[in-house]
Image: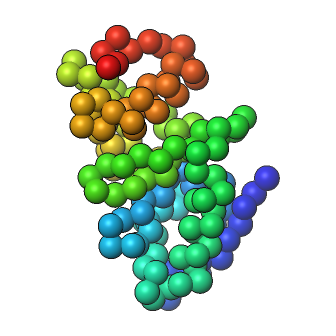
Amino acid sequence: MAYWVKIRYERNEYIVNFERVGAFCHEQNGRVTFWLPDSAIPIVINPKSNVEDYQKILEYIEQVSGLQFERAYWVRIYYERNEYVINLDYISSFCQEPNGRITFWLPDSSIPIIINPVSNPESYHKVIEYLQRVTGFFYPNEN
């Protein structure tokens, strides 16, 4: 089922199906960024200048974060001082390095997320758990 929302950004109005958005980034300064599906265009919403749309996004994030159901596997990952809420089902490739780090790229974006098993064990475990559950592959470097 679609979750359509009207968002104002840079004097334009966008009508976006949030169910097609695979990741949101909640930055330290309070801004929320997401990337338009199939376009890689970032939409950055500032809570001070766009309170209404900011609330719409936060409500959606709260609704889906941590949910694990048939068509979505949303997780919160802390990376480079930002909080990402990512639907891992939208990630199409993962790379595990010899040192154990896992890299994947945000959907509709070229931003890599690099998870280190030592410095970010909680996020690392979430990704490993997802990969083992969905793909059946075992990662021997997991701590």
* Residue 71 locus on image (x, y percent): 69, 38
Decide if residue 121 is in sight here.
yes
* Residue 35 locus on image (x, y percent): 47, 60
* Quarter location, residue 140: top left
Q: Residue at x 39, y 73 (%)?
A: 30
Q: Residue at x 54, y 14 (%)?
A: 136
Q: Residue at x 38, y 15 (%)?
A: 139
Q: Along the horizontal axis of the image, is 90 left or right of 19?
A: left
Q: Residue at x 32, y 67 (%)?
A: 28
Q: Along the horizontal axis of the image, is 118 left or right of 92?
A: left
* Residue 49 locus on image (x, y percent): 45, 88
Q: Which residue in the rendered view is the most extreme toward the left?
A: 99
Q: Along the horizontal axis of the image, is 5 left or right of 51?
A: right
Decide if residue 90 is in sight here.
no
- The answer to whether 74 is drawn above or below residue 103 in the figure is below
* Residue 46 locus on image (x, y percent): 43, 79
How many marks do you count on the picture? 0
* Quarter location, residue 33: bottom left
> What is the quadrant of the C terminus in the image?
top left
Q: How is the image coloured?
A: rainbow
- The answer to whether 141 is drawn above or below residue 62 in the figure is above
Q: Along the horizontal axis of the image, is 38 left or right of 139?
A: right
- The answer to whether 74 is drawn above or below residue 2 in the figure is above
User: As rendered, which of 105 and 78 lies closer to the eye?
Assistant: 78
